[in-house]
Image (cartoon, helix red, strand yellow):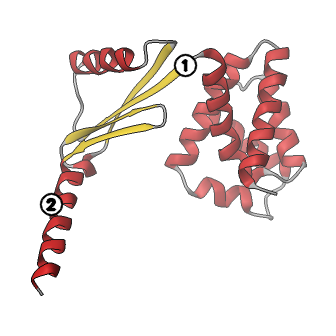
């Protein structure tokens, strides 16, 4: 079965279950934290795939990813995922839940990545720009620093990406030189 379909089905079920318990907002923040931890720590997936870890250890590991006291819905859901041996889909389930929740609550996702930290006035200008582009709904906006982009910024809004980084500009110039050089030979 398709990994995306499995993840989306579990995410839909979690959203319905969380709505029944009126905790979909808490589960949303927990799934955002879980997805972020998966992104920052690739060894988490390897640990969950390890057959030597029992379900209880895996549950404790996942609970630690989301902070102090996870919601009852989150705990039950993770228990179900582990019982059904679907832990390899957990990151995609978290990402699917985030997307489904944002779609239902009319939340636009925005992210600004810069090479160095920026002050609040720059963040506010970018938020204003994104709210003009996507005026309907609320904006969930975050910033991060990635020195690898060497300068400029990368701006994300939902599925769109505006890359104005120095790194990308240099790659384009390099590619143009390679193309021009190959024409001369």
Relative side of 100 to 164, left or right: right
- For image coordinates 62% across by 31% down, the residue present is 99
Q: How many labels sit on residues?
A: 2
Residue 74, position as x, y percentages in the image: 77, 29
Marks 1 and 2, the one that precedes in the sequence: 1
Per the model, the C-alpha gap separating discs 1 and 2 is 36 Å
Q: Is residue 28 above or below residue 148?
A: above
Q: What is the residue that sits farthest to the left in this orientation?
A: 184
Residue 55, position as x, y percentages in the image: 84, 50
Q: Helix, strand, or loop for circle 1?
A: strand
10 Å crowding of disc 1: few (<14), some (14-19), many (20+): many
* Residue corresponding to mark 2: 173
- For image coordinates 56% across by 42% down, the residue present is 37
Question: Would you identify the image quadrant in which residue 106 lies?
Answer: top right
- For image coordinates 65% across by 46% down, the residue present is 91
Residue 149, position as x, y percentages in the image: 25, 49
Q: What is the residue that sits farthest to the bottom in this orientation?
A: 185
* Residue corresponding to mark 1: 107
Residue mark closest to the camera, 1 vs 2? 2
Q: Pick whichever, 69 or 2, lies toward us.
A: 2
């Amino acid at each position: 079965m398709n990994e995306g379909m499995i993840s989306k089905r579990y995410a839909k079920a979690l959203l319905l279950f969380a709505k029944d318990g009126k905790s979909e907002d808490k589960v949303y923040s927990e799934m955002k934290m879980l997805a972020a931890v998966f992104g920052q720590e690739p060894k988490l997936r390897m640990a969950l795939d390890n057959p030597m870890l029992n379900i209880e250890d895996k549950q404790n590991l996942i609970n630690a990813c989301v902070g102090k006291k996870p919601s009852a819905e989150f705990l039950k859901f993770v228990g179900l995922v582990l019982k059904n041996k679907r832990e390899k889909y957990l990151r995609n389930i978290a990402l699917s839940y985030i997307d489904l929740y944002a779609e239902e609550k009319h939340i636009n996702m925005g992210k600004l990545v810069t090479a160095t930290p920026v002050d609040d006035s720059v963040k506010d200008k970018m938020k204003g720009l994104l709210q003009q582009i996507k005026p309907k709904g609320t904006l969930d906006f975050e910033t991060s620093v990635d020195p690898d982009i060497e300068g400029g910024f990368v701006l994300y809004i939902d599925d769109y990406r505006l890359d104005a980084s120095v790194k990308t500009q240099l790659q384009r110039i390099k590619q143009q030189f390679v193309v021009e050089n190959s024409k001369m030979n």
